Amino acid sequence: MSLLTVSNVTKSFGALRALRGVSFDVHRGEVLGLAGPNGSGKSTLFNVLTKIPVGPDSGRVVLDGVDLSGLRPHQIVRQGLARIFQTETDFGALTVIQNVLVALPRGIGRDVRLYALNLLEDFGLADQADRPASEIGVFDRKKLMIATAMACAPRVLLLDEPAAGLSKPEVGAMAKLIKQINRQDVAIVVIEHVMPLLLDVSERLVVLDFGEVLAEGLPGEVVRDPKVIEAYLGSEAQAHA
Ligand code: ADP
Ligand code: MG
């Protein structure tokens, strides 16, 4: 059953048509992988879905029956659509726990610090709660960004290249984390160039190319699609072999 329905979404930057009528569904409780060459529009898609900084030029995005077109970015988060960015966007001058505290919505109870600590515990970050975020490692910063998104209690979580720059064991740990979050009934869309991670976690794959959906389906079938191999996997698979 579709939880997030993206219909015919377009976005241009001047003459550049970054998204040319993108449609796909995110099913309740699934992990959907989003692949595609550099510049194919993956991050732009996350940007327009969350309206950071602006929504699509045209098309419709519906989250659990609610049309997001009239909503502002913070209202979209409150509806249950949260994301992490491709680059580290945590507040480096704040401590790890302060990063989570600023993301928590109002009304979650009195002991917000305990709530935030429990969340950090889930990500193995509790022992670093009072360190400035700028001082923790790259993997921990990525986990902190995801923890901060999870503080908003999303129903759909958008992850933009969570494994970029991680070591092999860290990639494995990230895959585990994605599955752990998914088990809490959070649907996840994950953009990733690290194919072993994408194939490990994704139940379905969507491949973008030049702002269009090139292929969609079961991972095993999509990676064998000659169009996908030509556009993307040949070079990427070699680059990451
Ligand atoms: P991907 O994440 O798949 O690598 P992006 O979504 O970042 O690709 O970019 C898609 C295309 O849109 C690229 O050609 C990129 O240069 C362009 N683009 C993205 N954001 C902007 C922007 N704010 N202004 C102008 N061009 C942009
Ligand atoms: Mg990108």
Image (cartoon, helix red, strand yellow):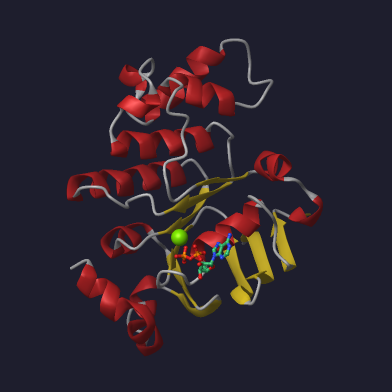
Q: Does 74 sit above or below residue 18?
A: above
Residue at the bottom extreme, as displayed: 226
**Residue 55 % position (x, y):** 70, 58
Q: Residue at 40% of width from left, 72% of height from top?
A: 37
**Any part of residue 165 in sight:** yes
Q: Does 64 sit above or below residue 114?
A: below
Total count of labels: 0
Q: Residue at 45% of width from left, 20% of height from top?
A: 97
**Residue 38 % position (x, y):** 41, 69
**Any part of residue 27 in sight:** no
Classify residue 212 as left or right of residue 146.
Answer: right
Which quadrant of the figure contains the N terminus? Answer: bottom right
Classify residue 101 as left or right of residue 164.
Answer: right
Residue at the front extreme, as displayed: 14
**Residue 149 % position (x, y):** 52, 38
Q: Residue at 26% of width from left, 62% of height from top?
A: 196
**Residue 34 % position (x, y):** 45, 65
The residue lying toward the viewer, choosing from 211 and 24, is 211
Residue at the top extreme, as displayed: 110
Classify residue 14 as left or right of residue 30.
Answer: right
Q: Residue at 39% of width from left, 54% of height from top?
A: 161
Q: Does 37 sit above or below residue 159?
A: below
Which quadrant of the figure contains the C terminus? Answer: bottom left
